[in-house]
């Protein structure tokens, strides 16, 4: 069973009643895969990506690149072979990127290299996700870009390149704006300096991922003070690139291990990961004694996992620094509070832009028939499936939405011996 083979609109998780043990190979990192795909497309020559993620998000990126004149072959289940001429071409139609945020933001910036018009669009959810700060920054670099609603669709009228220069960006709403500008920077006719307007940046670790990937494809970036970078106009060169396992996906398996007292072998050590969400492992290992306050600002995609884990903690947990979760695939703060309280009234609540989980270890071993609305959000689906390891009757609606980043999620749960009942 995978996301692709689940045909029912709902899946009910059967509590295993035992420790979960066994090996699971998590998928490749979505964040790193999409960065590597774009950089390979902007390089001249043939690049080979191994260990990559094959999911809805990366499929949207690959399809968009193909429509922009790049050869993207898929030799196996975890590989891409990308052959490009060092620049992108204008597509013949608007790029529809579904709800793939990384692809939308990165391609909005990369479109500045095209000679011609590029329209970047998405589904109804993407049309609610802000992109105005990135569009404004591109305009300050001399790029002709517009987004009438402040969200996609975005229209970029490229002139085959841009001069370079200095641009300021507020990275507090999304680090992806910063990463998009940095990756574009190496394609300028002159150096590009990207400076933050404040010290705060959402998930700064993802900018570090971007800088590492850029270096692997031949870019030169120097820090400017504590809140800026200067990108040399080197362009990119083709490279062979190995993608790490996805730390965000791993959080579900680490949590499943903690909730059942098991031992799941993921084949890599958390400390070996360069991804911000790997930091969640230390917190998960403290369960059921999670700290009373968790700052989720630098591991945002791990917050849904931690929030569901906190439901079974010995004491309440407040999540701070998580305002950015309101502009993800859905308003994750509202979704987490609503769905936790669907399991038990008052279990989750919003307090301004904080999330407070009341915690109730007595929930373990009970049966509470609950239909979890997932809001087409893969992370809501995967995290709330974890509640079903301790509580009977947890039903996940729209289980196929996990295909966005982890198509094999349900199959991996089955491989560990977790029962899943398809139905309505």
Image (spheres, rainbow, N blue to C red):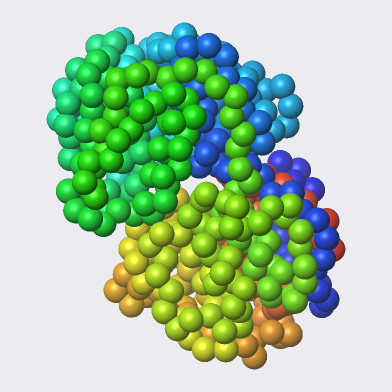
Relative to 113, residue 105 above or below: below
Q: Is residue 140 visible?
A: yes
Kindly identify the residue that appears in the image at 82 percent across and 77 percent down: 17
**How many numbered tags mark residues here?**
0
Kindly identify the residue that appears in the image at 60 percent across and 48 percent down: 246
Q: In which quarter of the view is residue 137 placed?
A: top left
Quadrant the C terminus occupies: bottom right
Residue 419 screen position, x and y as percent: 82, 64
Q: Is residue 385 visible?
A: no
Considering depth in this image, is 19 or 381 the residue closer to the camera? 19
Residue 130 screen position, x and y as percent: 30, 45
Residue 381 screen position, x and y as percent: 59, 59
Kindly identify the residue that appears in the image at 42 percent across and 38 percent down: 210
Kindly identify the residue that appears in the image at 52 percent across and 18 percent down: 238
Residue 203 screen position, x and y as percent: 38, 54
Relative to 76, residue 328 above or below: below
Residue 41 as seen in the image, left or right of residue 52: left
Residue 70 as seen in the image, left or right of residue 263: left
Considering depth in this image, is 306 or 330 the residue closer to the camera? 306
Considering depth in this image, is 139 or 199 the residue closer to the camera? 199
Q: In which quarter of the view is residue 152 placed?
A: top left
């Amino acid at each position: 069973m995978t996301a692709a083979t689940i045909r029912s609109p709902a899946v009910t998780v059967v509590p295993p009643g035992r420790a979960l043990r066994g090996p699971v190979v998590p998928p490749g990192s979505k964040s790193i895969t999409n960065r590597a795909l774009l950089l390979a497309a902007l390089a001249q020559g043939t690049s080979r990506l191994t260990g990559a993620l094959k999911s809805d998000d990366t499929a949207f990126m690959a399809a968009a690149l193909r429509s922009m004149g790049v050869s993207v072959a898929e030799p196996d289940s975890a590989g891409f072979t990308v052959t490009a001429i060092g620049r992108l071409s204008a597509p013949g139609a608007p790029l529809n990127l579904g709800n793939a945020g990384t692809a939308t933001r990165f391609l909005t910036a990369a479109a500045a290299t095209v000679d011609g018009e590029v329209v970047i669009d998405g589904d109804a959810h993407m049309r609610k996700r802000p992109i105005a700060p990135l569009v404004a920054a591109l305009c300050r670099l001399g790029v002709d870009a517009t987004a009438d609603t402040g969200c996609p669709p975005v229209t970029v009228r490229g002139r085959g390149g841009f001069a370079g220069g200095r641009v300021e960006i507020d990275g507090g709403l999304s680090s992806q704006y910063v990463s998009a500008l940095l990756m574009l920077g190496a394609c300028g006719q002159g150096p590009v300096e990207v400076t933050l307007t404040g010290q705060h940046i959402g998930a700064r670790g993802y900018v570090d991922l971007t800088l590492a990937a850029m270096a692997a494809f031949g870019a030169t970036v120097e820090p400017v003070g504590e809140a800026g970078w200067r990108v040399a106009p080197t362009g990119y060169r083709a490279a062979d690139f190995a993608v790490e396992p996805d730390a965000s996906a791993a959080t579900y398996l680490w949590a499943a291990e903690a909730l059942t007292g098991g031992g799941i072998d993921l084949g890599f050590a958390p400390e070996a990961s360069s991804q911000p969400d790997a930091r969640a492992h230390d917190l998960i290992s403290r369960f059921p004694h999670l700290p009373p306050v968790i700052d989720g600002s630098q591991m945002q995609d791990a917050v849904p996992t931690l929030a569901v884990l906190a439901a079974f903690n010995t004491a309440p947990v407040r999540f701070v620094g998580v305002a950015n979760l309101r502009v993800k695939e859905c308003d994750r703060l509202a979704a987490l509070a609503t769905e936790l309280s669907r399991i038990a009234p008052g279990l989750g609540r919003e307090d301004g832009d904080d999330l407070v989980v009341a915690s109730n270890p007595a929930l373990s071993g009970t049966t509470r028939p609950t239909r979890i609305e997932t809001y087409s959000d893969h992370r809501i689906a995967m995290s709330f499936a974890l509640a079903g390891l301790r509580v009977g009757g947890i039903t996940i609606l729209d289980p196929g939405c996990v295909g966005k980043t982890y198509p094999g999620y349900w199959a991996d749960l089955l491989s560990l011996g977790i029962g899943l009942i398809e139905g309505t």
